[in-house]
Amino acid sequence: MPVIECDVEEARERLDAAGADVEEGHTEHERWRAELGDANAVAYDDKVVVQGAKPVDITSVLEDGGGRVHLHFDGASRGNPGPAAVGYVLVSGDGIVAEGGETIGRATNNQAEYEALIRGLETATKYGFDEIVVKGDSQLIVKQVKGAWNTNDPELKEKRIRVRELLDEFDEWSLTHVPREVNERADELANEALDEA
């Protein structure tokens, strides 16, 4: 549950501009409440408390971006193709910024890996980071995105183009293949999503 210390009236203006539903607080201590996407917030005198399934929907509006973030991503498919899910973790110098795991329907393992990378990059973009260091345990995805390997699969080609578009939004980026054990949390998130489906 992120807590953002800030000028709560300025925060309210930012959320209004982003299209959030803002209403008066429910108690004498609450200044206002807001809902945006899959997140909600409660403002007190000098802070905003954010909750919900995707706190990034609000924190990305309220926090000033910049800096470097590390992204770990992983996709999973049971059946290849079969039920599939994605997992990603964003980590900055302050700790875990955001993480997510969700099912994506039926897909191959490579499609799930690409989708995990896309979801992680989209989340990092919402936070406004300048630099991103991306790590994943799929050698195929890393090599294709970097241009060392090609693909004849039209869907993977489209996903690779989307990944490159997202990477181009950062001032600096790197993409590295890492062993599965280095990518453990992203793998857990993808598999937990499949287990819960």
Image: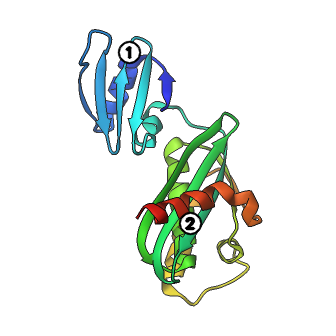
The answer to whether 118 is drawn above or below residue 82 in the figure is above
The answer to whether 153 is drawn above or below residue 146 in the figure is below
Give the label on residue 110, or none: none
User: Relative to residue 38, is residue 110 drawn left or right?
Assistant: right
Task: Say what amino acid the circle numbered 2 marks.
Answer: Val
| Image coords of residue 15 (percent x, y) | 34, 32
- Please name the residue that numbered disc 1 is placed on: 44
Residue at 40 percent across and 45 percent down: it is 53
Residue at 57 percent across and 77 percent down: it is 110
Distance Cα–Cα, label 2 vs label 1 = 39 Å
- Please name the residue that numbered disc 2 is placed on: 163
Label 1: few (<14), some or many (≥20) within 10 Å?
Answer: some
Residue at 56 percent across and 77 percent down: it is 109
Q: Is residue 152 visible?
A: yes
Q: Secondary structure at mark 2?
A: helix
Q: The C terminus appears in which quarter of the rendering?
A: bottom left
Task: Say what amino acid the circle numbered 1 marks.
Answer: Tyr
